[in-house]
Amino acid sequence: MLTAANLSLTLWAEAAKTATHIKNRIPLKRFNGKTPIETWTEKQPDVSYFRIFSSKAYMLINKQFGTKFEKKSKEMILVDYESKSTKGQKAYRLWERDTRKIITVRYVEIVENMPKSTAIIIEHEDSNSPVQDETEEEEMFQDAE
């Protein structure tokens, strides 16, 4: 998980906790299609909060006073789930590259499928195969003039 995400090996404990958290909530044959958590608690676990490990996460910055031009969020990386959340609300553990700190937050926006490139997929008229067009926007709009 860490290698695929290009993250520091110092986050191995968080990656291991995340893998265990997910594995305990996946149905297994040996439990007759139930999850380990469901076998233990007799309640089906909620997995609606699951997000892709190492996704970009934008933590809300709580600024009571400030200008409207200041940043409202901070970019971080999702590394774990907080299972002991208050009042049943789920929380996420985020890693900040600059300070190398892990922060637990509830108010976060997670972007799971951030594109690697901004290539545009176009269907050719004479074929069914998609073609990547890496034309910049400026060139596209110059043709329209």
Image (spheres, rainbow, N blue to C red):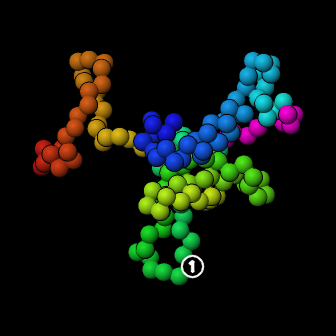
**Furthest residue to the front?**
10
- Image: 16 above or below 39: below
**Residue 63, image quadrant:** bottom right
Whether residue 56 is visible to the viewer of this picture, yes or no, is yes
- Image: 35 above or below 104: above
- Image: 52 above or below 131: below
Expressed as whole percent of the image width and height from the top left, the position of residue 57 reads: 51, 53
44 part of magenta stretch: yes
Q: From the viewer's perspective, is 76 left or right of 19?
A: left
- Residue under label 1: 64
Decide: few, some or many residues near mark 1? Use Cα within 10 Å; few <14, some 14-19, many ≥20: few
138 part of magenta stretch: no
| First to last magenta residue range | 40-48
Q: 25 and 98: which one is in front?
A: 98
Question: What is the magenta segment's predominant secondary structure?
Answer: loop
Q: From the viewer's perspective, is 20 left or right of 140?
A: right
Element on which disc 1 rests: loop
Whether residue 50 is visible to the viewer of this picture, yes or no, is no
Q: From the viewer's perspective, is 39 left or right of 137?
A: right
**Residue 16, image quadrant:** top right
Expressed as whole percent of the image width and height from the top left, the position of residue 127 reads: 26, 17
**Numbered-mark total:** 1
**Furthest residue to the bottom?**
65
Expressed as whole percent of the image width and height from the top left, the position of residue 47 reads: 69, 39
Amino acid type, mark 1:
Gln
User: Going 13% across and 48% down the picture, which residue do you hit?
Assistant: 142
